[in-house]
Image: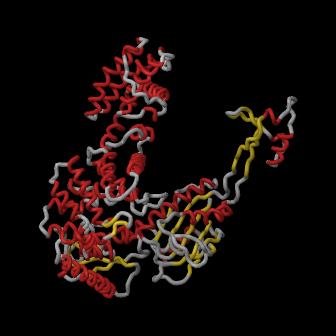
Amino acid sequence: MSDLILEIGTEEIPSDYLDNGLKELERISGQYLEENRINFSEDIVTYGTPRRLILSIKGLSPMQGNLEREVIGPPKNIAYDENGGPTKVAIGFAKKNNVSVSQLVSVKTKKGEYVAINSVIEGKPVAEVLSAILPEIIRSIPWPKSMRWGDVGFLFVRPIHWIMAMLDEEVVPFELAGIISENITYGHRFMSSGPLKVKNANDYFKLIRKANVIIKFEERKEIIAKDVESSCASVSGFLLNDDELLSTVTNMVEYPYTSLGRYDHRFLELPEDVLITAMRKHQKYFSVVDEKRNLMPYFVAVNNTKPKSDSLVSHGHERVLNARLSDAKFFFQEDRKRSLSDRFEELKSVIFHQKLGTLYDKVARFTRLAEYLTETIGSENIENVKQACKLCKCDLVTLMVSEFPSLQGTMGEIYAKLDGNPKEVCLAISDHYLPVQAESNLPESLIGLIVGLADRMDTIIACFAAGLEPTGTADPYALRRKSLAIIRLIRVKKIKISIRHFIEISSSILNETINFDAKEINEKVFNFIRDRFKYMLSNEGIPLDYIDAVISEDFSFLHQIDKKIDALRQFRNSSKNFESLVLSFKRIINILKGFDNAFVVKPALFENNSEKDLWNAFISSKESADHEITMENYLKALNTIARLAEPIDNFFNEVMVMAEDENVKTNRLSMLREISSLFIKVADFSKFTV
């Protein structure tokens, strides 16, 4: 058994790219090994630092597995004559595949009996296969953004400087991006010098550690966490926990070393969010707090090398941060010379999109949409909602947000509070941006939720109307994320609103100033959001047949979907009539294809007792089922509908739906249409397989 070690040496990879890049390297490697019939005894492991991606696979088989394959040829009755002798067809097939006619075998297929060849392709040495697939593995790693360099015409996250590839003591030879694989690696950029010769995989791990490179993410992270807490304790402080920042800086260093710094005490007069953002976002510094969680005038920086002088490095960090905080204080003081509401008119000079007007126009649109939502789902003060809409984008034209874009919403809330606005309005300004990501926090306030829903829906409708809908992986206006946010807000907060009507209202408001085919755009947006919802449910592990059953016909009221799926699961597990109902419903749907007559069912036209029995069972069940559906008691509704299983079976056993008498036929079809409409109120049973 053999061990493989692959190292791709690069220029500094962005920290937020590294984790996913390593996951993809592991996934793609496993895929290529499986496709190329290479067995290995231990897990595939990847490591990474800003300057290198590492793949380690232990216990590789020395030889690629053999490939057994069956090649189907012509039908047997063509390949052999009546005496069993091979025809020209059989001889030609054998010759084409380099075998003798005697090696042909007979196989049974769905189309009948055919002749075939069973052949075995012997595996190659693993070293030879790795030379071919390692370049493809590297080439296949997806990155958010890639770059070209020189004249190699090769795309990768950052320029590659070296490739080290060893199978036991031997180099795996290949060339990629003008780089030839070797048994050479390089240590820490500043704490190691010159190339390092690698003997084998085990030697690599010892060698790279001596060269001051810690390749394990968790080890670097643990060192940083421990040292940062120690630095905070040295000034009787505590670390302001920030797992995201900890992961970020861990991926920015190969050999972490922390240093404590101090900033001017006068900057504590600034809002805490400003200080934390200045340290966190721009400098990647950790904040220090006291026992009451109040900021202290200290920070902890993580360096990528052990300095000769701790104080010199700390002073360097202090100079940079104090300069940035001086700017922040100036911006804050300048911003406070005017109220937030005074900036509303400035939004007229901020272009939202050349086809869609200014940010002022957009706010005017989603304010009206927010009013509709307030009347539909909330009892909030309408004036507070309108004020929140008016102010929620005003901080975008402040100096502070221009310098620190991540503070949008946060500064709006701070400035609105200082201006004396109602608490609910201030909170809504920051809340309306939530959730920022798929699983991040939701708004605390109903006003923030309303404004956020209105803002997102206006953006989606406007972008679709302007022809800016997502294509493939391109989604420059983050419409997929906005759709998922709308779905999550409505679903988690159990907002009783029709998505379809919500879309139509937003579309009609936009259509007053921008000309587009509203009906077409509404349908596109509806389907787009439905596809996002289907994607979300699928990621939660819900089977596809359940998803299709509840959203294929109508999913306008999202808060009902989870209840319907739960009811269907319980019903399927407990009801003996489930399979019968599925089969009956599919039969009904097939019969009703193309039937669009508005004929009203007339019991006087019934000719068979089974017709009367089915209609009576339907009438007696419908009122009860409709009541339970209205109350969102879907399991009770399904159990009520299940009473129709036997009458439906009897009807199909005894009645020919397509009767010669046109009135009788139409009457029967109309009855089936009524029954199918009752089913559809809960789920489309035709989506289930039994």
Tell me: residue 166, above or below residue 320.
above
Q: Quadrant of residue 607?
A: top left
Tell me: residue 382, above or below residue 301.
above
Q: Quadrant of residue 398?
A: bottom left
Residue 262 appears in view: no
Of 53 and 566, nearer the camera is: 566
Please state the horizontal and vertical placement of residue 221, each as a whole percent of the image: 37, 68
Tell me: residue 670, above or below residue 150.
above
Q: Is residue 380 left or right of residue 181?
A: left
Q: Residue at x 86, y 29 (%)?
A: 82
Tell me: residue 313, above or below residue 672.
below
Q: Residue at x 19, y 73 (%)?
A: 271
How many labels sit on residues? Answer: 0
Please state the horizontal and vertical placement of residue 116, each as a whole percent of the image: 76, 40
Q: Residue at x 34, y 45 (%)?
A: 500
Q: Residue at x 38, y 69 (%)?
A: 248
Residue 62 appears in view: yes
Please state the horizontal and vertical placement of residue 545, each as a whole percent of the image: 45, 38
Colouring method of the image? secondary structure
Please state the horizontal and vertical placement of residue 446, each as a whole percent of the image: 21, 53
| Quadrant in which the N terminus is drawn | bottom right
